[in-house]
Image (cartoon, coloured by chain):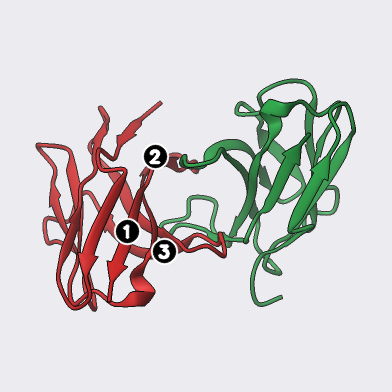
Chain colours: A red, B green
Amino acid sequence: AQTVTQSQPEMSVQEAETVTLSCTYDTSESDYYLFWYKQPPSRQMILVIRQEAYKQQNATENRFSVNFQKAAKSFSLKISDSQLGDAAMYFCAYRDTNDYKLSFGAGTTVTVRA
Amino acid sequence: GAGVSQSPRYKVAKRGQDVALRCDPISGHVSLFWYQQALGQGPEFLTYFQNEAQLDKSGLPSDRFFAERPEGSVSTLKIQRTQQEDSAVYLCASSSQIYPNYGYTFGSGTRLTVV
């Protein structure tokens, strides 16, 4: 099974500032998908951004962007211009191209200070 | 429906009781997943259905856990003789694809507390 590691249990950011969440993963596969999910107190996991491993270009979705370093097996999430609504738990997840299961990291709790 | 619906939202069970958790996936979604999320942790895979067929139950922690999806739509996760270690949030997710390139749509989960 693949291992996804999020080494930051908690991160705090001032409103309008930028925060970066780290994620590393372990795999022997060359083709796979990586995801960042947001889980607010409502508990529903919401897809924030995804990256296909065969694409070198880093994915961007509005204020959210990733830094995908395939050789280093690193997939960090940058939240720019942080808003109060960004406060949540964020999970990094991995899926093999030929598998249907997602493997999740332990999560990072993001707090946004007004 | 518009999203994945799970019920009940909260469930308190006495140790040894049986519980049944329901998941209504998005209409027409062929893939349905159950995950278990312990407090402060990431979700862990339990089981996978493709239509009514349970293709993978490798993540079920014991034979006290049983899942079904008899008509390929609604799914039920049943836990028999609940134990304190079963306390967790149980998340259901569905996808229109077998290999969901865009991830899944998750429900809001059922928080099970065993006392």
Image depth: mark 3 or mark 1 in front: 1
Same chain for mark 3 and mark 1? The answer is yes
Residue A42 spot, x, y in % from top left: 57, 65
> Which quarter of the image is occupied by the C terminus of chain A?
bottom left
Residue A106 - label: 2
Helix, strand, or loop for circle 2?
A: loop
B99 to the left or right of A77: right
> Which quarter of the image is occupied by the N terminus of chain A?
top left
Residue B65 spot, x, y in % from top left: 77, 29
Q: Residue furthest top?
A: B62
* B98 w.r.t. A46: above or below: above
Residue A110 - label: 1
Per the image, the residue denoted by label 3 is A47
Q: Looking at the picture, tell me which residue is in the foreground, A78 or A114.
A: A114
Q: Residue at x 10, y 37 (%)?
A: A72
**Distance between mark 3 and mark 1 Cα atoms:** 16 Å
* B82 w.r.t. B95: above or below: above
Helix, strand, or loop for circle 3?
A: strand
Helix, strand, or loop for circle 1?
A: strand
A112 to the left or right of A73: right
Query: How many tags in the picture?
Result: 3
A34 to the left or right of A101: left
Q: Give, as a three-letter code, the residue at label 3.
A: Leu
Residue B75 spot, x, y in % from top left: 78, 51
Q: Residue at x 22, y 49 (%)?
A: A53
Residue B67 spot, x, y in % from top left: 78, 38
Q: Chain of mark 1?
A: A
